[in-house]
Image: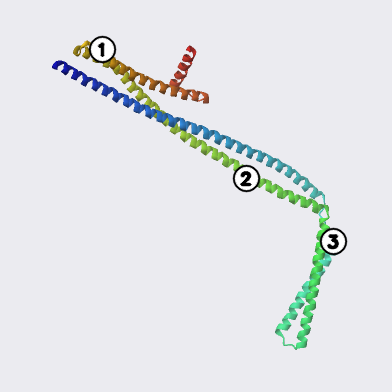
Amino acid sequence: MDMENFYHKNFQNFFERLLTQMNKLKNQRFALNDKINDLLIMYEKIDSVVLNSLLQARNFFHEKNKDILEEIKKLKKMETKVDKSLKVLKKKKIQVSKPRSDKKIKQDIYSLNQLVNQIDRTSKDLNNDISTKILEIKEEKKLVEKLDKLESKKVKYIKLINHLKELQISNLQKSAYFEINEKFNEKMKELTKIKEDLEFQINNRRNTHISMLKLCHNANQIKDLKQKIKLELLDHKFIACQFYSKFLNSFPIIDNDLKSIYIDQLEKRKKIQNIEKMNKLLKQTKKAEYERLNEFMRKKLEIALEKQKRGEKLHISELKLIFDHHQESKKI
């Protein structure tokens, strides 16, 4: 009886050590699976963000560039039209002789200006006399009255000069040359404004293109990060598969060792009961592991199918997943 207890205790210790090793391998694989799932989520998120950002940016810059090109086309058309009008007006200016001022009005303006200048000189002399000479009150009063009369005349002459100038301008404005010249100046201003707007739109298009290049540069940097995550994902996947393979390969060894020890050390009835319990435990463990594997493969298949829809390059393992999926679908 003591011997049986001894064997039973040894067997129990051995079985517990095996279970501890199995749980250790299982927990290591679960930890790696969690890491893989986190990387998958991050990978899909980055992929989605990059794709959506690029699509939105491309559409925005495409529409903006389209509007700018339309505006440039419109301005160039206007520029050509105005330029043609300027050439026509320039020819007309050459054909129409420049009008001359009325000689009589011109002479009258000149004469009046001379009179105004004479009044200024006389007024200066009178003011100088009042300031420097010792005069009697009557004499000074006469000089002041004379200055007032001269000032009144000067105001009268200046009004007449302004009137004659206005008359001169009015006569010039009625001429064909003046009308053509006014139109020519207006077109020149219009052309200058068009050239300024055109230069602004050209610079705007250049800046838009630079912004687009910067966006593409940033997108490429994100793609590099995505590729780094992908490599890390594959690395963890490989390690997880190694642990899973090691875990599965341990089952036949455990089965054979436990059965051999159990048959030698325990009676038949206890052996059958314990083997059934052990097999049930092993089946449950295998089932859980295979369910995790199937869930992992299902997620990989979904990712591969999404990439295939977007027209992205597939890894050979992803192609095999899609091929096996189609084969299984045909069987069903």
Q: Closer to the camera: disc 1 or disc 2? A: 1
Residue 201 falls in image quadrant: top right
Badge 1: few (under 14), some or many (20 or more) residues near its Cα, within 10 Å? some
Give the residue at mark 3. 102
Residue 74 percent across, percent down from the top left: 69, 40
Distance (Cα) linking label 1 and label 2: 92 Å
Is residue 43 shown to the viewer in this render? Answer: yes
Residue type at mark 2? Phe
Residue type at mark 3? Asp
Instruction: Please report whichever mark, 3 or 1, sits nearer to the chain's N-terminal start.
Output: 3
Residue 136 drawn above or below residue 146: below
Is residue 100 shown to the viewer in this render? Answer: no
Which numbered tag is attached to residue 272? 1
Considering every residue shown, the one lying at the far left of the view is: 2
Distance (Cα) linking label 3 and label 2: 47 Å
Residue 165 percent across, percent down from the top left: 80, 63
Residue at 79% across / 80% down in the picture?
146
Q: Closer to the camera: disc 3 or disc 1? A: 1
Badge 3: few (under 14), some or many (20 or more) residues near its Cα, within 10 Å? few
**Left or right relative to 271: residue 62:** right
Distance (Cα) linking label 3 and label 1: 138 Å
Badge 2: few (under 14), some or many (20 or more) residues near its Cα, within 10 Å? few
Residue at 41% across / 22% down in the picture?
295
Image quarter in which the N terminus is found = top left
Give the residue at mark 2. 200
Residue 100 drawn above or below residue 258: below
Residue type at mark 1? Ile
